[in-house]
Image (spheres, grey):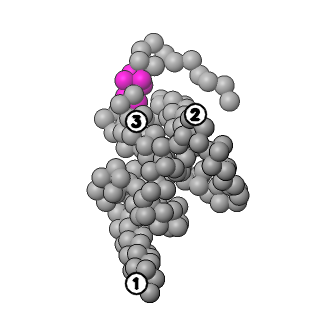
Amino acid sequence: MALRMPAAGEATAFVGLVQPELPGAYRLAGYLLRDATDAEDATQDALEKAWQAWPKLRETDRFGAWFDRIVVNVCRDRLRTKRGVRVLELDDEIASVPHARDPFREALARDEVGRLIRKLPPEHQIVVALRFWRDLSVEEIAERLQMPSGTVKSRLHYAMRTLRQEIDRQGGEAQR
């Protein structure tokens, strides 16, 4: 795919809008994908898709929501393709190499709720991440995912119910 040449000032305007969104986009991708390298790649892919679609964006004041939607869609695609891929963990000696540190993997490994969230279907993981990690309202999530707010509420409900059941189940096993 060939990159188009930007019109005068277009690149500056795009950079001005996307730059403040990149840290949050990277963290969102890292939370959803649970891997720093995947998060970097997903953020880069989202940035490229946003640049390609930039001329079609009519409301620049809604850039953040638009870019979040692109990031989520890229992560969703990666989560779908990842299901069929078997990942082998590296042994401790290789994983302890300084340049191999992954802040997402380390933080989520210590986080019991994070481990439980990984068991949810990708569509539920996404709404949980947007609601509780990005602190977005149901309406804002619906806008970003281009779905009815009732669907967002339903996915949140089922995700939270599943998490509660799993926490209760694990609590019961710990008491035995």
What's drawn in magenta, residue-wise? 13-18
C-alpha distance separating marks 1 and 2: 40 Å
Circle 1 sits on which residue? 175
Question: Residue at coordinates 61% horizontally, 44% vertically from top-left?
Answer: 95
Most extreme residue toward the front, as rendered? 93
Quadrant in which residue 84 is drawn? bottom right
Q: Which of the two discs, 1 and 2, sits closer to the camera?
A: 1
Q: At label 1, which amino acid type do we have?
A: Gln
**On screen, 28 above or below 129?**
above
**On screen, 176 above or below 158?**
below
Q: At label 2, which amino acid type do we have?
A: His
| Residue 31 position within the rendered picture, expressed as x and y whole percent measured from the top left | 46, 50
User: Can you tell which mark lies on residue 62?
Assistant: none
Q: At label 3, which amino acid type do we have?
A: Pro
Circle 2 sits on which residue? 99
Circle 3 sits on which residue? 23
